[in-house]
Image (tube, helix red, strand yellow):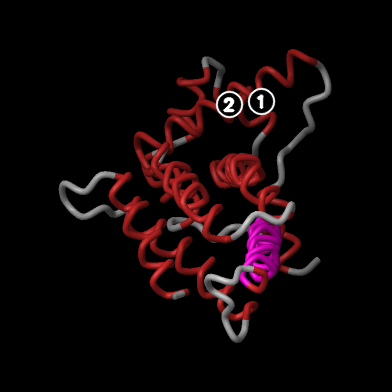
């Protein structure tokens, strides 16, 4: 067996929750883990703290997850799914033909809000560990979808009409994600999230003009 497959095995949940009681236990562990990672970060977010927060024994926790990394990865999958759900209305508007300039403010505000809800958790998920390929593929798929829809909207928007809509869309999407991640998780002193969203929106608009 290759080292990659061994590593993936160590990070996979030990068992699948089939009964409602087991499902409730898993949900309690994952919810507790999100809270512990948010409060203490990855290094101090121990399985003992997670079990205590979840109200289960450490033995029960290990029945479902072999280690802390396996828990964190499952939390990350849910975090990505929640992000997709939050962005869905904006993607739908683009898909239905709304102009990019109409969708941009709400899209940026949503991205900023997603990062601001639990910044320490976000840092633990995306800065302190290397996510497994399956999770990274989900993120890449979301980004590709957003770039595709943005490129189509830019090409149809007479107010911007870049020479290369696909390249412009890639720059815009990556700029929004990169700036949001950096400025919300590591904010300048005294700067509110609303101000960050406003400035990112202005920056993208000026780039496209």
Residue 42 versus residue 35 in the image, above or below: below
Q: Is residue 194 visible?
A: yes
Q: Nearer the viewer, residue 174 or 47?
A: 174
Quarter of the image where the C terminus is located: bottom left
Residue placed most toward the observer, 173 or 186: 173
**Could you tell me which residue is drawn at 45 percent across and 68 percent down?**
175
Image location of residue 107, percent across then percent down: 52, 51
- Magenta range is 135-154
Residue 177 on image: x %, y %? 48, 61
Question: Which corner quadrant of the image does residue 128 belong to?
Answer: bottom left
Q: Is residue 193 above or below residue 155?
A: above
Task: Find residue 114 and report its horizontal and vertical position in percent.
Answer: 48, 43
> Quick one: quadrant of the N terminus?
bottom right
- SS class of the residue under badge 2? helix
Name the residue located 34 percent from the left edge and 51 percent from the top edge. Answer: 184
**Residue for badge 1:** 26
- Verify whether residue 7 appears in magenta: no
**Residue 187 vertical position relative to residue 30 in the rendered view, above or below:** below
Residue at (38, 43) in percent of width and height: 120
Asked if the magenta segment contains residue 142, the reply would be yes
Q: Which residue appears at 65% of the width and 65% of the height?
A: 153
**3D distance between C-alphas at marks 2 and 1:** 5 Å
**Dots 2, 1 in contact, CB < 8 A:** yes
Q: Which residue is mark 2?
A: 29
Q: In which quadrant of the rendered view does residue 76 lie? A: top right
Determine crowd level at label 1: few under 14, some 14-19, many 20+ residues with C-alpha closer than 10 A: many
């Amino acid at each position: 067996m290759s080292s990659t497959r061994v590593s993936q095995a160590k990070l996979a949940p030990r068992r699948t929750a089939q009964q409602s009681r087991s499902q409730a236990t898993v949900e309690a562990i994952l919810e507790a883990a999100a809270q512990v990672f948010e409060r203490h970060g990855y290094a101090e977010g121990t399985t003992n703290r997670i079990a205590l927060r979840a109200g289960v024994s450490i033995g029960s926790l290990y029945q479902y997850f072999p280690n802390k990394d396996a828990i964190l990865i499952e939390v990350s999958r849910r975090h990505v799914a929640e992000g997709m759900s939050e962005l869905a209305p904006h993607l739908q508007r683009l898909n239905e033909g709304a102009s990019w300039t109409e969708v941009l403010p709400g899209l940026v505000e949503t991205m900023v809000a997603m990062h601001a809800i639990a910044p320490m958790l976000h840092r633990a998920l995306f800065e302190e560990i290397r996510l497994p390929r399956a999770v990274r593929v989900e993120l890449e798929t979301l980004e590709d979808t957003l770039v595709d829809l943005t490129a189509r909207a830019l090409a149809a928007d007479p107010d911007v009409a870049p020479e290369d809509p696909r390249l412009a869309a890639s720059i815009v999407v990556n700029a929004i994600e990169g700036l949001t991640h950096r400025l919300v998780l590591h904010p300048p002193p005294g700067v509110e999230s609303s101000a960050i969203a406003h400035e990112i929106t202005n920056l993208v608009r000026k780039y496209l003009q």
